[in-house]
Amino acid sequence: MKLKSAIIPLTAAIGMAFAGAAHAQEVVKIAHVGPLSGPNAHMGKDNENGARMAVDELNAKGFTIGGKKVKFELVGEDDASDPKQATAVATKLVDQKVAAVIGHLNSGTTIPASKIYSDAGIPQVSPSATNPKYTQQGFKTTFRVVANDAQLGAALGKYAVQKLGTKHIAVIDDRTAYGQGVAEEFAKGAKAAGGTIVGTQFTNDKATDFNAILTSLKGKKPDVVFFGGMDAVGGPMLRQMKQLGISAKFMGGDGICTGSLPSLAGDGLGDDQVVCAEAGGVDESGKKGMDDFRAAYKKKFGIDVVYNAAYAYDATMTVADAMAKAGSADPKKYLPELAKISHKGVTGVIAFDSKGDIKDGSLTLYTYKGGQRTLLAVTK
């Protein structure tokens, strides 16, 4: 009986030791922030899904940092595309001592949150914020994996005049940092190419009635209406353009260049009517990798990619790569590696310039035919 009583505590002690070792596995918190409520929730969830795919893959293969196996935990937060909520979320994540932030989605939330992350020394990699101001603040912690509005807007403006042969252009923006920024850059590009801006109107990112501004623009007979904003507003705007008999081409940035636009626009979306640009994209050599990603995404989540999921995936994988190279998940230690990273991702090679902008960012132009997004061109 004495022998038995001695064995039982020893067995229990060994079990507790193994349990303690498992529990001691380092947990690395990576946050994703985007709108998970409100009109842009479908985009925010899409980005979060991309980040989650990366985290799940890293955990499945037993990722190590500094020779130690780690477990990544994705901390998802909702900023509702609202700057005030974004800064509140940023403060919360700093308090939670997350190792990195993937996000935010909108420029209007990314920019104010970036100072809070910078002050805390936490790297922030946005998969979709395109306003140039984001990386022009002098922060060492700000990065993005897509081209900015100066590149995107200029390319669209040039395309409108030189490729579509349009001269009379109307511009509408939703007064957000993203919408206003991309509209201004488009107007510059169009003017530089020889186009004329015949009218400028404003709305907001929650508007549903555009009859007044569209009626005002109709009288100016534009060949193209450019909209700086998101698909939740752009879709209904297309419906109302058709109702008013406006047959102009409709152009916009990556905010409208989504898989959701056809359902949001309904019969307002005619074949070849829309020309939009995505701040990113792959050439023929990267097409298989992107197709494989989209297939894996649909298998995992049961839905198609909506927006920038692949960029959120690449942003997360790039951060993990920097941690591995530094041998640490401590932001102070891996931030220098992130700044000089060269990571081969689904969307191409991720490498940053001195400001944190992606080097050699691609732009992809699309139209829609039969309710499906159709590639026009990939450009640098």
Image (cartoon, helix red, strand yellow):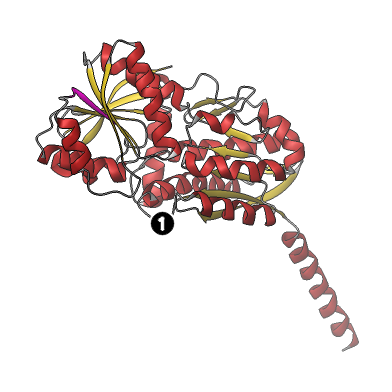
Q: Which residues are magenta?
A: 222-226
In x, y percent, where is residue 101? 60, 45
Queried whether the magenta region covers residue 360, the answer comes back as: no
Q: Residue furthest right?
A: 2
In the rendered image, the quadrant that contains the N terminus is: bottom right
Res. 230 image quadrant: top left
Q: Is residue 310 in view from this perspective?
A: yes
Q: At 37% from the left edge and 17% from the top edge, which residue is drawn?
A: 189
In x, y percent, where is residue 169? 24, 22
Q: Nearer the viewer, residue 243 or 377?
A: 243
Q: Nearer the viewer, residue 241 or 323?
A: 241
Q: Nearer the viewer, residue 139 or 265?
A: 139
Look at mark 1 in the image and give the residue it sits on.
37
Q: At 57% from the left edge and 54% from the top edge, which residue is drawn?
A: 89
In the rendered image, the quadrant that contains the C terminus is: top left
In x, y percent, where is residue 14? 81, 68
